[in-house]
Every structure is written in structure tokens, then in C-alpha cells.
Image (cartoon, rainbow, N blue to C red):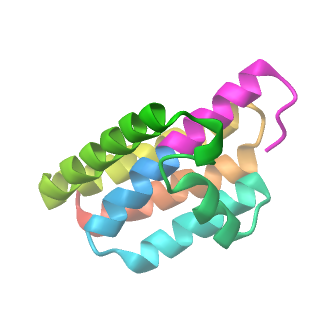
Amino acid sequence: MPSSSTRTTHLERHIQHLFRQTYFRLYHANEDRTNAILLQHYADVLEMPGPELLANYLRPSHDRRVQSAGDFASEEASWKAFVAGVEKAEWKWKMAGVVECLHDVGTALKVVGREREAGRWWEMSEDVRRFYDV
């Protein structure tokens, strides 16, 4: 997704945040197949290979050298707290959150005119909702 404007950059950050949330909710619900599909969709949206996507967006910091040790420790603690919260949540709540996050990614893509891709995310959201009856 190109970063040609502040709005798009903000949108990219928003989608990255939604991706992390959705990825970890699926991971802790042991839904590896759905997670693989999510990863591929997101990699397609960002035009980035899956392994690079995981390396760049599924860890607390893109580069420890850019942050002070204190900043990194704070960010890492916050990240661990988020993951712990997801692990403690009830399974049904996790899947409802996944559905909402997938739908939100579709909506964010529609805002920037990527309606075809948005439709794929909405379909995936609806499939997960129906499959898990949430």
C-alpha cells in the first residue's frame, strides 16, 4: 500500500494494528488455516512477501536500534500484556473480535478506493462469522 499521503500512512498503521490483533486472536484460538489466509490477504494488500510481513509487523519493534532501551522495554511490556489479554479471553469473544477486525480492514481499504480487495476481506469476515456462529 503506497504511503503517498498522511491519510494513507495513517490508514496503513490502522490496518497493521488490525492485522496484529486479528493474527493473535486467531493464533490463540488455534485457527492456523484461517490465519494463513489472513496473512496472505494482508501480504497482498501491502504487496509484501509473507515472511517479510511477519518479521516487520508481528514483533514489538521494527528495529531496536531506533528506540532507546526504555522505550523498547515499555513497548514490549505493552505487547506482552496485549497477548496475555487475548490468551485469557473467552474463545467466542476472540472470534467475534476477529470478525470485526476483518470487516474493519475491508472498510479501511474501501476508503482508499480498493473496493475489490475490501470485498475479499468482507467475505472472509462473513465466512468466519457464519462458521463460528458469532
Q: Which is more toward the observer, 57 or 115?
A: 57
Residue 70 sits above or below residue 93 on the image: above
Q: Is residue 62 one of those drawn in magenta?
A: no
Estimate the x, y position of residue 47 in percent, counting from the top left: 79, 58
Rendered position, 16 above or below 33: above
Quarter in which the N terminus is drawn:
top right
Q: Which residue is the extreme one toward the top?
A: 6
Q: Main secondary structure of the magenta part?
A: helix
Residue 5, how many percent across, how many down?
Answer: 83, 23
| x 58%, y 35%: residue | 67
Q: Residue at x 34, y 74 (%)?
A: 31
Of 75 and 125, nearer the camera is 75
> Can you tell which quarter of the image residue 111 is in?
top right
Q: Residue at image x 84%, y 40%?
A: 2
How many numbered markers are drawn? 0
**64 to the left or right of 117:** left
The correct choice, above or below, for 63 with respect to 109 in the image is: below
User: What residue do we see at 48% from left, 43% from top?
Assistant: 18
Q: Residue furthest front?
A: 69
Q: Which residues are magenta?
A: 1-17
Of the 4 image quadrants, the one containing the C terminus is: bottom left
Rendered location of residue 6, percent (x, y): 76, 20
